Image (spheres, rainbow, N blue to C red):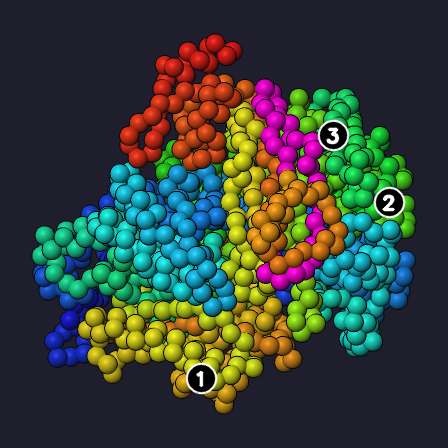
Amino acid sequence: MTKELDPITLQVVGGALHSIAEQMGNVLYRMSYSSIIRESQDLGAGLFDKDYNTLCESDSTPMHIGSLPGYLRGIEQSVPLDAWKDGDCVIHNHPYKGASHSPDIAIVMPVFHEGELVGFSANTAHHVDIGAATPGLIIDVPDMWAEGMLLDGVKLYNEGARNEDMWKYIRDNTRVPGLVMGDLEAQIASAELGVKRFKELLELYQKDIVIQATKQLMDYTEKRMRAEIAKIPDGEYFAEGFLDDDGRNRETTLPIKVCVRVEGDGVEVDVTGSSPQVPTAFNVPFDGSTKVAAFFVFRALLLDTYTSTDDIPANEGSFRPIKVTAPEGCIFNPIAPAAAEARFCQIQRMADLVIKALAPVLPDRCTAGNAATLSFAAYSGVRPSGDYWVFLEVNEAAMGGRPMSDGPDTVEELMRNTRNNPLEDLGMHLPLICDRYEVRDDVPPGAGKFRGGSGVVKSQRYLTPGFMTHESDRHLDPPWGIFGGKEGAVGKLEVHNTKTGETRQEYSKFSGLRTEEGDVISYFSPSGGGYGDPLERDPHKVLDDVLDGFFDVDHAKEAYGVVLKEVDDGYGWALDASATENLRTTMQ
Amino acid sequence: MIRVGVDVGGTFTDIVLEQTKAGKGSDQDVVVTKVPSTPHDQSEGVVKGVLQVCEQAGVKPDDIDVLFHGTTVATNMVIERKGAEVGMLTTKGFRDILHMARHKRPHNFSLQFDVPWQSKPLVKRRNRLSITERLMPPEGTIEVPLDEDEVRQAAELFKKRGLDAVIIGFLFSFLNDAHEQRAKEIVQEVMPDAFVCASSEVVNVIREYERFSSTAMNAYIGPKTALYLRNLEKRLLDNDVNAVVRIMQSNGGISTIANTSERPIGLLLSGPAGGVIGGRWTGEHCDTSNVITIDIGGTSADISVIQNGELRVKNPRDTEVASLPVLVPMIDIDAIGAGGGSIAYVDAGGAFRVGPRSAGATPGPACYGNGGTEPTVTDAQVVLGRLDEEQFLGGDLSIDAKLARKAIETHIAKPLGLDVEEAALGIIRIINNNMALAINANSVAKGVDPRGFTLMGFGGAGPLHSVALGEMISAKDVISPLQPGITAAMGLLVSDLQYEYTRSVVATLNDADDNTFQHLNKVADELRAEAEAQLEADGIDAKDRRFRKVMECRYAGQGFELRADVPDAKLSKSNVQEVIDSFFDVHKQQYGHAFKDQVTEAVTLRVIASAAVDTLRLKDLPKGGETNPSAALLYSRATVFDDVGAADTPRYDRMKLKADDVITGPAMITQHNSTTLVPPGHKATVLGHGDIRIAKS
């Protein structure tokens, strides 16, 4: 056992590791081909020791952070530690062996130092199509074999030599080999870089010092997390909500129940009582996703990187005080071979319900109800050449009002943090054109002292016939207001055809929908709930909201008790301070 | 010929005057001075400094021929959000591109984060008006014609609102600028005094958010930048300075006042650019073409890499100012929050940290005695005996070593159970490590091997850190420039006139046909004609004009481009492979991989036009060749180094050193605005013009 490192060496080694992970992530998204990786940065990368402890991880999207050790444990079932050779490269995506979900394929390379296996360089990235039942995404499928290629700890390289048969097999089993193979090349380049940098670090510092530094950094992060949990009064805190449906049985809503048990400096998130597992792909892999969501929400709530100036390393230390309980056979812990690919809406809601449960005791750190959902759209079609095109798009939503500020509008919230795709880049390359991308103006955001964020509206028009699958939720249960704030708005999805002029509403999730030329798919995301009494909102901010078109004069009066008068200054409205004061008095 | 360079920093404005005696090109005098900066109006300090340097040099203000200026005026305007009230006309259905940005939030693990483009927008939502019009990719054909009445009504409304500036940003305008140009004409008819620009003329490239954001930035800083430059010219004229004025640009080139006023967006990184140019120039006359520069100031350090004597330009996907993208060429400079004023502390979890919080100019480090009690990097240097009280800024500023000791003892040494010297060494090691990691991120991470590079540290504190940093990144050796405190101002005098013109082309190269080549060559010719016209307007002789073509390429399907070189001759089937090969090489260098079997796609064509200006030449130092010359020895005093502890360390007066003199470590070489540290086991050699090269002995 190496003795405690001095604080200076600790900072030096910790900084070096962090920089390696960032470089790995950087190479991966810059080199990659599919927009889901290169623009949305739906990826994770890092270094791990032989016991699968995380040494460092890239700060890319929250969903991927903390998921790789599960993959490594899953791989060990096929490739035991003594079966690794220098120059090997393993590919893995098995949802019941640690994967976050099957499209998130991991590439893992071993790191040898002085002839001995010391750890791994690994990354995961979301692949645009792995040959599932429907192009890009799936919802209504019977089991995990309908998810596409299952890669269970397969060696893609043996001691530096590529397994060409395997390579061909993958190429032959995706609808878009041009994207998938290029993305795999980017993953391999990133993992190779990690191997190289890890070896250099081990040459610079002794192996024991590097490992010891990572242990201490994890202890440090754990200590900071425990100190914050300890400040929450012991007790059980509850919250619940429901999901629209499973994508097949439209009449059945799915309950989510969350109990947060705080005891001393530890906490348990228990989802017992939530919906049983469903017969479609709308289930959540337990290790790779359910647990990650619980870890995420406590880190965001208690070690908020915006309000704290200390740079606290993102590592497994922050997970240790958190226990996650989900009964087997529940939607958050399904039993194989249930499909479990479409898992994001559920964990968003679970994370948001943890915030709701704790809001009464964390009023300065919580938010009102967030949109807490996902709009994951798979647009696809077949080109005249016979080749498929598949495009995955993540549509943002909005956040709830907050203790010191309004909820951000049109933004990636909670577990997701991808980037959108430039509309012009899409227009140049796909038979799809965007007709509208704006702040949602058909409903006001949740009123409050700090209002909820406004959602987004995005309309994509098919220029040729194609297919669409949409993974989403929250058309029924609106984001809540808190401490006197009002609820936000639910989402909706419309299909309008420019040729026939017909418009119809669609469910939040659907699979393999046939689309026609001129079909315009318009997604309206939920808007966030309000925080605090709307009558306490600064009247000048209400005026700003009206001038900026977030809501109209009538809503200002009805929801906020703010009276505006017409003026001829080019803007149209000014505050009527005395009328506002009078109205607010009568409304209280 | 008399030329003056003025570099405005946060605290001081540095001025360099260079005089070439008539008839004798090689006989030059260089005079430098410094005045406090005047943040309320930088031109006040500029003029004061110019007059002061004239007096010191014994020349009259109207003798100055050219004045070069690097300024942070535009950047500060953005950071402090003190720009113009801007209106925007945009395509109907897309009012909020600037509000949504790339929809990624700035923090992964935060619920309370700020979204600066929403909370502090450059164009408020109320001033973003939608216009009926529609262009279609991939050709830019008109699906819905421009509604000119709507444009006119919007302009009337902006006029009534009293806006200073208007931008026009239509979707797909990089394919066809007809709608933007027509809308601009209408707005200008209605608002003849407003600053009006269209997105396709500010940056004519694909990707709507980045193009609109750049255009908004240009308009936001436009009116006040133009006003500043007019004031500066007037103030100079009022004081008999009738020199030609040239302004430093973010890309390391210089431009005229007229061009800068029209396209102020090029000015955003004007401040730190001078330092990098100064570093390159120092490298040139030290016969060193591979240099990593680090400019260490009070609160931040700027890092850049010069390879084969060429500045590295940032990938356009990474250029941003105050978290907002700006698609203009900028020197690849990384700034990190590490400097002399960085504060050391022990955090709530017991971790030892230094920076990024800084003591700034007030209260400053504890040793300044201005009320600062928290220990800074400067305090650590004082405790270690690396900054002598009587040498600090040549004795202009008095420091109190006891206050430095006390601050470190109270805040670091006691809580961590270290002695004060250990704690001070720790502060230096951690800050050096932060800087070394940032250097790696800007070098190793981009395929540059530091073992073939010289590290050059400047800014007053640069040469105190450079040897330690050089070791940490495995640099070949280290250079301490002649005047580390004013390297950035010197850089202004050695910059070339430079302009860049770009247009999106979006075409695959491997299978390009004659039509495609014709189009690419036509775009290249048009860009070159624009460049020729600008240089003509600047009065540059045709023989002095230089042009370079680059193509920003990617493998078809990728999202990030890299710069490939384009041959001078017209592009054709016979030479397009040169572009593809150049892209292969740069891809391989950046990512460690490249592909022979993938299709290369051109995205943007860029023409870079430049013209060399007279360069600064330094006098040769008289030859010395002595080791540890006693004539330059000031005194010896205890100084603490890593591993060896306190050692009696001689101080040498840099002004008395001669060419080929050698100083063996441990030693300190002092001058008015800087101290160069030569640790034990190292040897410093004085070069021909007074720069010092330090290497392991």
Residue A137 in view here: no
Question: Is residue A533 covered in magenta?
Answer: no
Region rendered in magenta: A462-491
Q: Is residue A583 above or below residue A205?
A: above
Q: Main secondary structure of the magenta part?
A: loop
Q: Residue at x 59, y 67 (%)?
A: B558
Badge 3 and badge 2 in a common chain: yes
> Separation of disc 3 and disc 2 at Cα?
21 Å
Q: Point out residue B583 in the picture as x, y percentages from the top left corner.
A: 53, 76
Q: Residue at x 84, y 31 (%)?
A: A272
Camera-side residue: A354 or B684? A354
Among all residues in the image, which is located at the extreme front?
A: A500
Residue A521 in view here: yes
Give the mark nearest the N terminus, 3 or 2: 3
Camera-side residue: A531 or A543? A543
Q: Are marks 1 and 2 in contact (CB under 8 Å)?
A: no
Mark 2: few/some/many CA within 10 Å (<14, 14-19, 20+): many
Query: Residue at label 2?
Result: A279
Instruction: Say which quarter of the image contains residue A526.
Output: top right
Q: Point out residue A568 in the picture as x, y percentages from the top left corner.
A: 28, 30
Report in which chain the residue with disc 3 lies: A
Camera-side residue: B585 or A539? A539
Q: Which mark is residue A241?
A: 3
Instruction: Say which quarter of the image contains residue B664.
Output: bottom left
Q: Is residue B83 left or right of residue B597?
A: left
Residue type highlighted by circle 2:
Pro
Q: Is residue B31 left or right of residue B685?
A: left
Q: Is residue A5 above or below residue A255?
A: below
Q: Residue at x 74, y 30 (%)?
A: A241
Mark 1: few/some/many CA within 10 Å (<14, 14-19, 20+): many
Instruction: Say which quarter of the image contains residue A208.
Output: bottom right
